[in-house]
Image (spheres, rainbow, N blue to C red):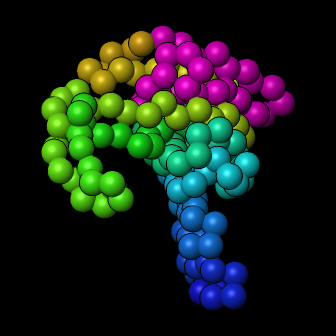
């Protein structure tokens, strides 16, 4: 469904949305939920069973169930959060529309800061920050209360990847 006056499009299943006016979009299925674009200016984005409040201005934040269960009752999920990233010492022209030098490793990745709120039946979830090598880097503080699981990414053990699993 295209609404040119509002500058947006919504799929007929209501699972995919894009606003070219707000410069954001989302995917909202039972097992994968994602928000992308200039999230920081939007404040809170609410999907079915998930709310994301991004402090970082530009990001992609996606959560997927790693089981056959939907996010709302999965005991094993992966959250990916990425924004601006580039090789060390990459160089661009003044308008930043042409790359002059590809740079070298390592890739420099912006830390994404956001609050994640999941409506879930699983009461014993724990969030692990996962480093670039795939190892646990630390536990992210979280709270479960009245069917709501809440945590913040980016404040401690920042990463692109977070594993959410039942203990």
140 and 40: which one is in front?
40
Instruction: Name the side, left or right, on which 131 lies relative to 37.
Output: left
Instruction: Report the residue at 65% width, 86% height from top.
Output: 3
Instruction: Report the residue at 23% width, 33% height from top.
Output: 89
Rendering quarter of residue 167: top right
167 and 108: which one is in front?
108
Instruction: Report the residue at 26% width, 21% height from top.
Output: 133
Rendering quarter of residue 132: top left
Q: Is residue 36 above or below residue 23?
A: above
Q: Which residues are magenta?
A: 138-167
Q: Is residue 7 above or below residue 119?
A: below
Give the residue furthest to the top: 138
Instruction: Name the side, left or right, on which 63 lies relative to 8.
Output: left
Point out residue 153 in the picture as x, y percentages from the top left corner. Answer: 58, 27
76 and 104: which one is in front?
104
82 and 146: which one is in front?
82
Point out residue 37 in the picture as x, y percentages from the top left corner. Answer: 53, 56
Give the residue furthest to the front: 94
Instruction: Report the residue at 70% width, 54% height from top.
Output: 42
């Amino acid at each position: 469904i295209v609404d040119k006056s509002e500058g947006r499009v919504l799929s007929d299943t209501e699972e995919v949305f894009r606003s070219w006016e707000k410069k954001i979009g989302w995917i909202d299925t039972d097992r994968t939920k994602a928000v992308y674009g200039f999230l920081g200016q939007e404040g809170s984005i609410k999907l079915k069973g998930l709310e994301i409040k991004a402090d970082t201005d530009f990001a992609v934040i996606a959560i997927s169930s790693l089981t056959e269960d939907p996010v709302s009752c999965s005991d094993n999920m992966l959250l990916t959060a990425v924004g601006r990233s580039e090789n060390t010492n990459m160089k661009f022209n003044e308008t930043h529309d042409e790359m002059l030098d590809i740079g070298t490793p390592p890739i420099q990745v912006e830390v994404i800061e956001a609050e994640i709120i999941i409506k879930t039946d699983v009461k014993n979830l724990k969030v692990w920050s996962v480093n670039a090598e795939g190892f646990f880097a630390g536990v992210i503080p979280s709270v479960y209360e009245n069917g709501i699981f809440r945590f913040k990414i980016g404040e401690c053990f920042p990463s692109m990847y977070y594993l959410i699993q039942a203990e």
